[in-house]
Amino acid sequence: MAQELNIHLETDSSTPLYRQIYEYIRGEIRNGSLAADERLPSTRALASYLQVARSTTELAYSQLLSEGYIRSRRNSGYFVNEIENLPDLRLEDPIDEAVNYGTAEPDSGQKSREERDLFSLHAARTGGFAADQKEDKGQNPDQIDFSLRHTEMSVFPYSTWKRIMREVMAGADQEMFSHSEPGGDLSLRSTIAHYLHFSRGVHCRPEQVIVGAGNDYLLMLLRHILGEGRNVAMEDPTYLRAARIFLSFRYRICPLLMDRDGMLPESVEESGADLVYTMPAHQFPMGCVMPVARRTALLRWACGQADRYIIEDDYDSEFRYRGKPIPALQSLDTAGKVIYIGTFSKAIAPAIRVSYMILPQELLNRYRDRCWFLSSTVSRIDQRILNEFMHKGHFERHLNRMRSLYRMRHDELVSCLVPFRKWFSVRGTGTGLHLVLQCRKDYLIRERFERERDSAVSLPPAQPESRSESFPGALPGSLPEALPESLPEALPENLPEALPESRFESLPVALPESLSAADASKVEHILAERALRAGVRVYCVSDFLLPRQELCGLEDREAEPGPAVPVQNEKHVYPALLLGFGALSPDQIREGVKILSKAWNIPDDM
């Protein structure tokens, strides 16, 4: 039975009626009067009870939905979400801060101007948004894109951010327009250290935090700190842009085998590596979470020699939907072996372009000796704005709202994929902004993919400025390199009317227990193209495999060669596809999965 809401509306107030309804329900949820999973009255029933237009209650519910306070169940109604770790904030301006995020607002033109103002400002400073605009120009608006790079920006608190910008500029002094410390303003570094300690269990002093404009810069900074001739162990598949950066340093890449829990610790020792790059909180792209036993095994490996280190990329750690957050690997480190890297690109906005790195004391000493002459790459004004956004609690509030919103979308996608489970296993659930669909053997046997006529689509030449430059020697039809927070698109938007003959020859009639990596890649691209023909974009795991030819083509390297690079492509795997959900509405998720079920011949018999 739906909970009755005794809302007293002030018809002579300057606050619109829908905002009064929204603020009342939000307050009841925040103070616990409306419990998690409690059903709310329908918009029609509430409108009738309050004697207001139904559009008024729909607008209030829409705002609560967008902020993650409630969820909608098809044919069941609206229910209260469980709100975790939500601070008791007193809003200075609830109309500006809590409302006007992506709903049908009367002054929607003002909101769009706020978005343009914010991002044009950061585009001018960082150049980051211009590339995204170029990539999105040819996007088919009717296409449902399970994108790995897009996040939900309609709920960003633009008014709050703009107000902080005005306050920072109004209080500007001579110091703000002078050079900051190479590692960033100490006030922001202190705020980041405080946030990481309570959210991720990270132990550090503010002096150990180094702020930089993106992970690329921080990795390049590490080259000066760690020196030349390093052997870097990386999971395969992995974050290819990091691999590209390491290769530009003439570091040797050691691909490591993975299972459902991530990299195998014994393979690290066998690889001959002295540096490990890993994403234990949410491995990209496979979505696995490294258990504590493996984390401690990695730390034991690092302690085996004096100059071994682990680079922990805490990718997507903010978005965990089940159970308690797993502490960072750095929180277990008592020997100074973990270099911790994080970013605000997913939690706040890609255009912010602020990342941070926590250096162990020994490496901090090297940084001071070798990098003292390098200037900070983040504007001091941007650092002040971000520090105020975090220090005043706006970041935590926004993060809780995004976590609730993404949890709803995650749960919706998992629910929609139930009919697929006979033919695909769903991996990477419970955390992050994408899921992995891995083909089961029965599906491969049923489909066969013999004489498949769905050809792979030739990719157009990549534009270097769009972060889509590909590796030489990558698998045919593979994705170019990509940042987890800024991924390129897998296939062009518009297919030609007449497609060339498939370059995917028949797969074996008698399938083995699993396919070779090369054949698995063919199946992935066949399925991705079938989806694209039907109007849905998905992404292939094989496009994030480390490129063998480039890894082995380092004949002119001056350093002594290490052990041979294992031929990872000889392992047997099952094909897998990636589905991102961060920027899709529940309706788009449902429609996209419905289209996939038809494109991939998934019977709706469950």
Image: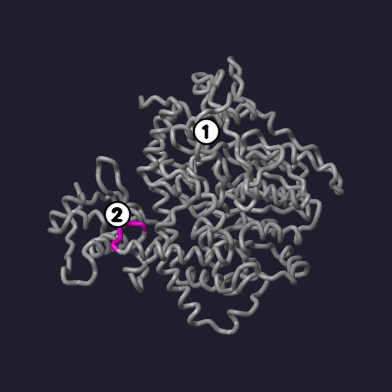
Q: Quadrant of the C terminus?
A: top left
User: What numbered label is drawn on residue 62?
Assistant: 2
Q: Secondary structure at mark 2?
A: helix
Q: Is residue 209 visible?
A: no
Kind of residue indicated by mark 1: Pro
Residue 179 x, y percent position in the rendering: 65, 77
Question: Which residue lies at the image location 35% right of the left edge and 71% below the top edge?
Answer: 90
Residue 244 x, y percent position in the rendering: 69, 48
Kind of residue indicated by mark 2: Ser
**Which residue is labeled 1 in the image?**
496
Given this view, does label 2 or label 1 mark the residue nearer the observer? Answer: 1
Circles 2 and 1, Cβ within 8 Å, touching? The answer is no
Q: Secondary structure at mark 1?
A: loop
Rendered position, 382 above or below 538: below
Quick one: 333 or 231, which is closer to the camera?
A: 231
Residue 23 x, y percent position in the rendering: 27, 64
Does 24 appear in magenta?
no
Q: Quadrant of residue 396?
A: bottom left
Rendered position, 211 above or below 508: below
Question: Which residue lies at the image location 33% right of the left edge and 69% below the top edge?
Answer: 94
Q: Residue furthest front?
A: 497
Residue 152 x, y percent position in the rendering: 44, 53
User: What numbered label is drawn on residue 385?
Assistant: none
Mark 2 surroundings within 10 Å by alpha-carbon count, few (fewer than 14), some (14 through 19), many (20 or more): many
Question: Which residue lies at the image location 61% right of the left edge and 59% below the top edge?
Answer: 214
Q: Which residues are magenta?
A: 102-106
Q: Residue furthest top?
A: 510
Dot placed on the residue nearer the N-terminal end, 2 or 1:
2
Alpha carbons under labels 2 and 1: distance apart: 39 Å
